[in-house]
Amino acid sequence: MSVEFDRPQDPHDARFRLSEAVRRIIEELTSSSGSSAEFEHARDLVEQAASVLTAAGHERTYSGAEASLSDHQDTFFLDFSPFVGPLNPLAPPITLRAEEDGSVVGEVVFGTAYEGPPGCVHGGFIAASFDEVLGFVQSMTGQPGMTANLQIDYRSPTPLHRPLRFAGRVDRIEGRKIFTAATLHHGDTLCAEARGLFVSMRPEVFDRLMRGRPAAG
């Protein structure tokens, strides 16, 4: 039996629908061949939307953006993560689930905005996605920490607009050091492999980071 990390989103939730709309805008900006007039019209609408939100408050609390620190938060669901957060339009997003054997599986489709080589996902996004997936993996040990080292081996080009599958696991634990490993596949093709070292964080360190967090907006 698998356990989904993310909770279902209400399709009528205004913030969720706005995030989805912004993802569409990002995809269109990187692929559309519209006319100058059409882009100007779209710009006016986006500027109007930005003005509406700028006039609103900006007192959002820290509700999760770093997978590796998920045990320090109220839930595994990280609303604003740049890789798994459904409320962050920068996220593809990656959907994660925990398996009975303690491993973590992530499924994602990267759009045109993540392109590096022609038709392929940029290697930097692959590396950052591994960091996020392995962050979830090590958080399940009960002593989560932050990334100390991340090593990526790229095996074959990773295609855009195709279903991809991350699979991560804990390799071993040595004191505060948590060693992890993961793979990325497109179908049966191995696209990349990763090894990550995390060092567990003391609660007082997390509290210090929270106190130093700058105000939103």
Image (cartoon, helix red, strand yellow):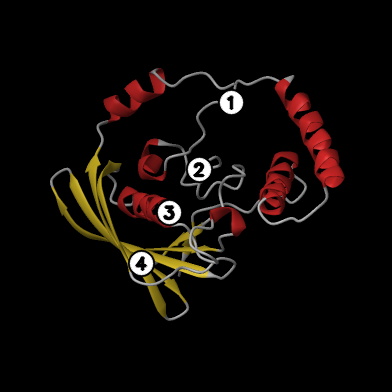
- Tell me the quarter of the image containing the N terminus: bottom left
Residue mark closest to the camera, 1 vs 4: 4
Marks 1 and 2: which is nearer the front?
2
Q: Is residue 9 left or right of residue 167?
A: right
Q: Label 3: which residue?
A: 129
Q: Could you give the CA–CA distance between mark 2 and mark 3, rounded to whole angstroms?
A: 11 Å
Within 10 Å of disc 1 (Cα), the crowding (few <14, some 14-19, many 20+) is few
Whether label 1 touches label 2, CB < 8 Å: no
Asked whether the beta carbons under mark 4 and mark 2 sit within 8 Å of each other, the answer is no
Residue 105 x, y percent position in the rendering:
43, 64
How crowded pointer 3 is (Cα within 10 Å; few <14, some 14-19, many 20+) is rated as many
Label for residue 81? 2
Quarter of the image for residue 183 reads bottom left
Question: Tag 3: residue type?
Answer: Ser
Which sits in the foreground, 69 or 193?
Answer: 193
Residue holding disc 4: 192
The residue beneath circle 1 is 60
Q: Is residue 112 left or right of residue 28?
A: left
